[in-house]
Image: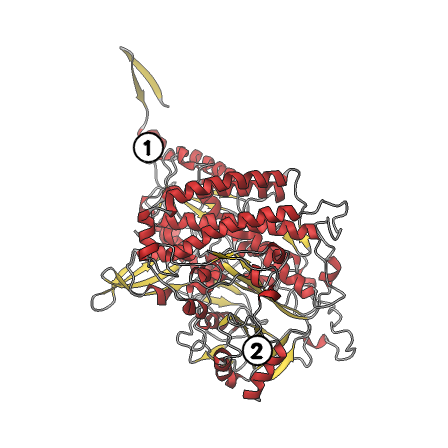
Amino acid sequence: MTEIIKPGNDEQVFTTTVDEFLAWGKENSLFYLLFATACCGIELMQTGGPRYDVDRLGMIPRATPRQADLMIIAGTITHKMASRVRTLWEQMTEPRWVVSMGSCANSGGPFSKYSYSVLNGVDKYIPVDVYIPGCPPRPEALIDGVMALRERVRKYRTVGIRDKDPHVVQGADCAFGSHPGKASSLELGASSPQGPKA
Amino acid sequence: MTSAAPAGSELQAPSSKLDNAAIAERVIAAHPTVAARSSDNGQPYLLVPPAEIVRVATLLRDDAALRFDSLMDLTGWDLSKYPATPPSSDLVVAYFLHSLAHRHHLTVKVQVPREAAEVPTVSGVWAVANYFEREVWDLLGVRFAEHPNLKRIMTPDDWIGHPLRKDYAYPQSYNGVAHLREGQRFEPPPAPKPAAAAPPAAPPAPRPPPPASGGGAAAP
Amino acid sequence: MSSDLAIESAGGERMRINMGPHHPATHGVLRLIVECDGEIVSSATPDHGYLHRSIEKIGECVEWPMFVPYTDRVDYVCAMNANLAYCVAVEKLLATDKTTAVQVPRRAEVIRVIVAELNRISSHLVAVGAMSMDLGAYTPFLHGIAQREGVNDIFEKLCGQRLTYNYITIGGVGFDLHTGAVEEIESFLAQFEKEMIRFNKLITTNTIFRDRCAGIAVISAAEAVAYGLVGPNLRGSGVDWDIRRDEPYGIYGELGVRVPVGQGYAGRTGKVGDCYDRFIVRLLEINESVRLIRAALKLLPPAAEKPADPVGGFQADVAKALRKPPKGEIRVRTEAPRGEMGYVIVSDGTKTPYRVRCRTGSFTACSIFNKLMKGIFLADIVTVIGSFDIVVPEIDR
C-alpha cells in the first residue's frame, strides 16, 4: 500500500496508512523485557551479546515491563512463579507480544513428566505469539522466532477493528480467565495421604 | 597469594585427623545412647536418638579433638519403600559433618517415625542448619522443634503434602490451573517397590533380587 | 529501579520494598523482601522457590544414566561440573561393591578435567561480568560473554550443545575429543589470557568499581564456615580450602591445584572477606584453571581403538553395573565454580536411584543474606548479590 510519489524537484513523498506506519515503527523497535528464569536466560543473554547482537534488530532489553513491547519467556515457569508472570504481562503496555522460548515455557519440557511444581506451558496463564522449541534453543533459533514475530507485528492494525485482536485480552476472554491467585485452591488426587498443611 | 600444595590429600591432612572408629568411641563415651552403625554398603555413621541430637551436635562442634565446625549437608529420606531389614516406614534425617581444623568427616543420622516426625533443631549449633532444616521440613515433612522460622522454603505456602515422601500424591491443579496439558497422559513415578521383597536369607548377597515390578513403570 | 516495586508502610519510618522475583540484578527469580530505614537496610529476607523444579523428585523416577541431563539444569552456567559431580558420585557408589566397580579410562579422566576447568572459566566469566553489569558497567559483561562464546564453540564441536552438555557420563565421557580439539583449546587459552589483561584493565583496577566493593558485606572466616559458605565465597573470607586439592577426585591430585584466598585486595579500604575479595578470588581462579587445563593437556594419553580401553578409551562399560548397583548410600563432594556440589545418593539395588540429594553452593550462600545485609545501603544489595554469584536453579533445584 505504501507508494512513492515524486511531485517533482527530486523531492520524494511516501504515502501510507497510519496502521502501516505504526506497524513499521513497532516492528523495528521491539524492546524486550529482561525476564529470564532459567537456562534459556543464559542463551538470551548471549543472543544479546556481541556475536549475535539482537540490538541490530532494534531489540533492546528493558528492565521494567512498562517500557517493553515484547516478553521473552526464557526458562521454566513454576506454579509459584506463574501468577507473577501474569502480573508482569498485565503491566506491559498494549500491544504486547509474547515469545515462549524453550521447551519448558512451551510445554514443561523435560519437567512435564515427573515434576510436581512446574507449570506445563506458560500459555495456560498468558497468550503466546511464537513458540521456539529447543532445550535451550540456539541463538539462531531465537532470532528466527523473532523474525516470525516481526511478520505478525507487521500485520497488526492499531486503528483497525480491535475486537478481533488477539492481543487485546479482556477479562474472561483470556486463556486463563480472571486473575489467578485470589481463590487459592490446591486440589489433590483422590488419595491424599497428608491432610492440609500443618 | 596462592598456597602451593603437594599432590594428594594424605600429605595435607594434619596428624590430628581421626578415623571414624575413634570419633565414634569418643562420642559414645560421652553419650552412651548413641550407636555406631554402618549402611548396607559399609559407610559408617552414628545413629543418635532424636532427643539427644542437640547435645551430641554441641559436643561434636566444641570438643577440641573433634571440632566439626561445618555442617556440609543436612538432608533426609523416606525409608518406607527401602528394602531394609527389618522393613521400616521411618524418616531419616542425615547430618554430614566436616572439620576444617582436623580434616575429618562424620555422618550422623536420626530416625523418626513418620506419624510423629519431630527432631530438635540444630540451627543454634550450626547457623546454616536453619536453611537446611526448612528444606527438609518442606520436602520431607520432618518438623524441627524450636526452629526460629520453620516455614516452607521451596513450595508455596499453601502447598499440600511433602513431595519427597514416597506416598506423595501429585497435585491435579494449583491455583485453578490444571497441572497437566490437555491430552497429556500422566505417567506416574515407578510403581512402589515392595519393601517386603528383601529376603532376610542369603547374607553373602547383600542385594535383594530386583522386584518384578520395580522400575518397570519407568520405561516409556 | 525495581519493576516489581511494592512499597507499603511497615510502621514508623520503615519502608518495605519487594525486590524481585523479577529484578534484573537478582540473576533470575530470587525475591528479597527488604525493609529499610531511609537508605539503610534493616532486614532483607530472601524468598525462594520460584524456580523449584523438583529435580530431586525426578531423580527418584528416572534411571541412573537418565538423570545426567537433569544435573545440567541444576546449574546450567557450569553444566560440565554438574555432570561431573553426579557421575563421580555414582561411580563411588558402584565402587563400594567389588562386582560393580567401574574403572574410568585414563583418557576420559583427563578429558573430564579439561572440560570441567574450561566450564569453570566460562562460569566465572559470567559471574564477574554480571557483577560488573549490576554495578553499572555493561562493557565488561560483553567482554565476558564474547570469551564465553569461545568456550561454547569448543564444547559445541565436542558434544553438539552450547549450554546443557550432557557430556560427562557415568564411567567416562560421551564422546572422544574431536580432531584438532587440543590445538583449538590451546589457541583459545592463548588469546584468552591476552583478553583477560584487557578485562582487568577495564574493570578490576577501576577505582569506582573497587570503591563500591571494598569493605562491603565483610564476612569473617568463622562466620563463613558457620553459614556453610563454600567455594570462592569461602575462600574470599581467607579460608584455605578447596576440594580439588584437599580431597581430590579424578586426576586433580596429580595436578597440584593452587588455591587463591582473599587477602583484602582492595587495599586501604578493603577488608578480608569483602565483596572485592570474592570478585578477585574468582579472577585468580580463572588463571589457575588456565594453568590446570595446560597441565591436563600434557597428561592426555593417545586415543585407543576400543572405547572401553582402560588407558586410551573414553567410556567404560557400565550398563551391567547400573542394572544392579549396590544397595546402600554414598556422599561425594566435588568443587564446582559456585563451591561444593555434593551428592547424597541412596540406592535400593534397582535401576532407579532411591534418593538423589544435591547440595549446592548458592543455597547455603543465601542463608547468610539476612545477617549480611543489615545496615548496608539499599544500593549495595546488588553488590552483595553479585559478589556471591548465585544461580537461582542451584538454590531452588
What residue is at 63 percent from the left and 68 percent from the top?
C330
Residue C64: where, in percent of width, then height? 66, 60
The residue that label 1 is drawn on is A22
Residue A50: where, in percent of width, then height? 44, 37
* Along the viewing direction, whichever of C66 and A115 lies nearer the viewer: C66
The image quadrant of residue C65 is bottom right
Read off the chain for label 2: B
The residue that label 2 is drawn on is B109
Residue B51: where, in percent of width, then height? 51, 86
Q: Are marks 1 and 2 in contact (CB under 8 Å)?
A: no
What residue is at 50 percent from the left and 79 percent from the top?
B64
Can you tell which of label 1 and label 2 is closer to the viewer? 2
Q: Residues within 10 Å of mark 2 (few under 14, many from 20)?
A: many
Read off the chain for label 1: A
Look at label 1 and name its amino acid: Leu
Number of disc labels:
2
